[in-house]
Image: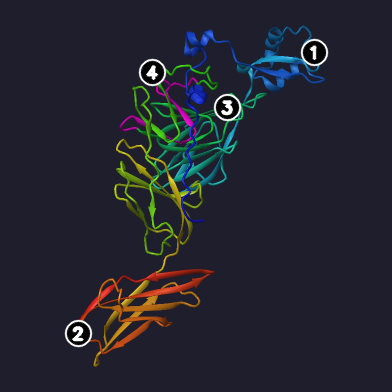
Amino acid sequence: MRGVCAVRATAVPFLAFALAFVALPRGAEAGENAAAQPPEMTTYVTRPGDSLYDIATRYLRNPADWNKLARLNHVSEPRRLRPGTTLRVPVALLRQDGLSAKVVAANGPVQHAFRAGPLLPLTVGASLVEGDRVQTGHNGFATLELADGSHIALPPDTSVDLATLRQAALTGATDRIVDLRHGEVNSEVTHATKRDDRFQIRSPSVVAGVRGTQFRVSYDGDKGATAVEVLDGAVGVDADSPAGNRHGARAQPPAPGTPLTASEQLVAAHHGNLTLAGQPAGAPVTLLDAPELLHPSKVQDDQDVAFEIAPSAGASAWRVQIGRDAGLLDMIRDRRSADPRVSFANLEDGTYFVRISAIDARGLEGMPASYAFERRRVALGTSAGPVEGSRDFAFRWFIDRNAPNTRFRFVLGTTSDLRAPLIDRTDITEGDAVVRDLPKGVYYWTVIAEQFDNGHYYQKASPVQSFRLDW
């Protein structure tokens, strides 16, 4: 696989999606507005043998609340329910079962702890639950997978709390809240299948509520700023319900046309916003387009892996990430650079994926583009000098990665571009060549190693070198 695999941004109709997922207070803490709203209801259709006692035991937090169901549904005989009867059940009475998150990737220094417990190394395959916290070190990466297939990727220097991981009995609606203490969370959330499904990333300055999208949330504690960048879908951002407010959020959409409050913003695909602590949610702005990677098919055979990004308008910096999979869930490198040429050391041979994006003057990261590349480190050493006692000039080279049918091409010329070579030999199988009777002058030369390895053709050229003959 080679070429661009850029994330595709599909805009969601504004009012259709609108405030459905903007995090707003609910319950008694929301004041008069919440008090004026009727309690949320779901329904249950009775089956043969059902009783209110059984239903309450299976689905309610408190089995003794069967009597509330009896009063609400005007049931006079709780032990005998006619099959096919539709009962109304308050959502607030339903039992909440705990969910877990599986660690699908962990690289570098990554730790976790349950609540205030001691930090322990995080390992692939571990299960995390509500109350767990995860933090990545300076070169640490972790990716968590939720029960519905959603993913939460944590780059270096990030700390999060799994504040809520629950699923309601009877309805199956999920409630997942991640508190971002510092750093960044990259989320790929599956489309909600239940009306009341909720997924939120909360920083100390905003709540980002979503329902089927790809987005990033980063929090800079020094600046008190939270950036939200949406790649696909839409994200509701509310600055009035920071992480310090633990009162949940509205999960159902309001009627079409309901206006946004002063603290809310809907951020659609290909847009982002920046919100400062204590300020209303920042207005959405268009993210920079995905930049272009120069020479994407180049085999990375030098000592360091290096990427050259084509400069683009509006970009003040670039971000380059490397992972072992196309989705970069198993990420191993992450770097921001003001220079469009970004390099990485100590990367083993193999096939990898690189994701690049441009960063604007506000610090908002733009749309990404992904490419596959091959890492195949090859060292080609060369030397040259006159043969003592003669007018011969000897050239020698070696390659540290031997392969069957390795051949060398030796090129010698009088210009640095070697466009009109004096010698261009392609039949060399050994590591040397001798040229006789060269006249005075300046010469340029290079050697190119050509290999067929596992059905693939590779070539590695030495730098063009020069020498002067004065005899």
Q: Which residue is mark 4?
A: 262
Q: Residue furthest front?
A: 420
Q: Which secondary structure lies at badge 1?
A: loop
Q: In the image, what residue type sits under mark 2?
A: Lys
Which residue does the numbered mark 2 point to in the structure image?
440
Residue 354 visible in rendering: yes
Which of discs 2 and 1 lies nearer the camera? The answer is: 2
Image: 449 above or below 57: below
Secondary element type, mark 3: loop
Q: Nearer the viewer, residue 39 or 77?
A: 39
Label 4 SS: loop
Q: Give the quarter of the figure containing the C terminus.
A: bottom left
Q: Amino acid at mark 3?
A: Asp
Q: Earlier in the sequence, mark 4 or mark 3?
A: 3
Q: Are marks 4 and 2 in contact (CB under 8 Å)?
A: no
- Image location (x, y in percent) of residue 270: 43, 36
Magenta segment, which residues? Answer: 221-247
Q: For marks 3 and 1, give the one nearer the viewer.
A: 3
Which amino acid is tagged 4?
Ala
Which residue is at 52% across, 24% downward?
16
Residue nearest the viewer, comparing 29 with 429: 429
The residue to which callout 3 is attached is 197
Q: Decide which of tag 3 and tag 1 comes sooner along the chain.
A: 1
Tell whether label 2 touches label 3 (CB within 8 Å): no
Question: What is the distance, in whole Å, between disc 2 and disc 1 at their CAs?
Answer: 111 Å
For the residue labelled by badge 2, is the local secondary structure a helix, a strand or a loop?
loop
Choose top left, top right, bottom left or bottom right for residue 92.
top right
**CA–CA distance between discs 4 and 1?**
51 Å
Q: CA distance from mark 4 to mark 3?
A: 25 Å
Alpha carbons under labels 4 and 2: distance apart: 80 Å
